Image (tube, rainbow, N blue to C red):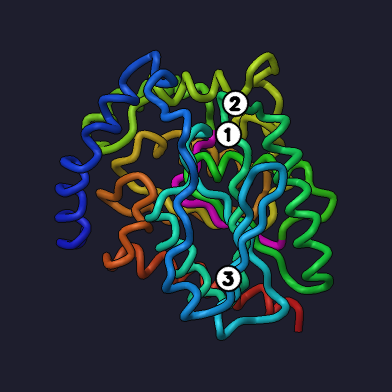
Amino acid sequence: MSLSLALTTLALWVKAAPTRRALSRDDYLSTLDPNRAPAPPPARLRRTGRLRVTRRGGHEVVRYEPARRRAALELMYLPGGGLVNPLVAEHWWIVERLARATGAAVTVVNYPLAPEHRAAETAAFVDAEYARLAERVGSGRLIVAGDSAGGTVALGLSARAERSPDALVLFSPWVDLALDNPAIARRSRRDPSLRAPGLRAAARAWVGGGSRDDPEVDPARSDVSTLPPTLIFQGGNDIFFDDVAAFVRRARKAGAPVSLVAAAGGFHVYVGAHWTPEARAAYARVGDLAESLFRVMT
């Protein structure tokens, strides 16, 4: 673990204390702000490219086209937030660096959230946005990326899509909604931000009256043999680590082209700390993935 990642982790233990306390509660949903909304795109994005904000059904979809971009590459980004919280300012750091690393136009989809909305509504909204992007890119390449719960949504989309994404990029994805792995209790002692009780409550609200056994809802029940090339970045101090490792083993056993990059000492979605060597290395790997997609085309 680099010094900058270690120092960032210490700072996160302080900054994320209210989040840990809230997520430790079984009634976590009662702590949510009913007026919560996604953080707006920073002004600097307009200086480095073209930005367009669209509202569909009360939900924002933001398209960022960097000044230097590959016309034949689109990237959909699905932000995390435990299925109940919207995009935060730090997500824009990730979006910017994905655009730089890949040269893609990035479409950020602020999908419907629980408890106001259910998984089926999330899926319908994301599927419609994905279909628009697939039509736009045509014979080009389309990457779907997401962090945390955004990874959950991305995996569900990949399972449903008639045209499979050309690749998935997942940052600390939530791959088992049950969070009943015994290793979680041990790893939570080192996780500065996440706790299982509140996340379980969020998952129950999102699933609603449906079944968590639906493979399009919970990646732990999905057919991993159909995954496209998938690159997963996971921190070693994240309570999701053991579930992600199990998911990757299952996918590889099924013959899926899944790669796992594990950062020792990394916290949940450690790539958000873009100033660390670990995050810079992660974005470089994503850039390599994008480049490989174009080599396949030619």
Label 2 sits on a secondary structure element that is: loop
Q: CA distance from mark 2 to mark 1?
A: 6 Å
**Residue beneath label 2, please?**
116
Label whose residue precedes the other's in the sequence (2 or 3)? 3
Q: Is residue 228 visible?
A: yes
Residue 122 appears left or right of 194: right
The amino acid at mark 2 is Glu
Q: Is residue 51 above or below residue 157?
A: below
Residues shaded magenta: 166-175
Nearer-the-camera pick, 161 or 60 = 60
Circles 2 and 1 in contact, beta carbons < 8 Å: yes
**Residue beneath label 1, please?**
113
Label 3 sits on a secondary structure element that is: strand
Label 1 sits on a secondary structure element that is: loop
The quarter of the displayed image where residue 190 is located: top left
Measured from the top left, where is residue 91 in percent x and y? 43, 55
**Residue beneath label 3, please?**
51
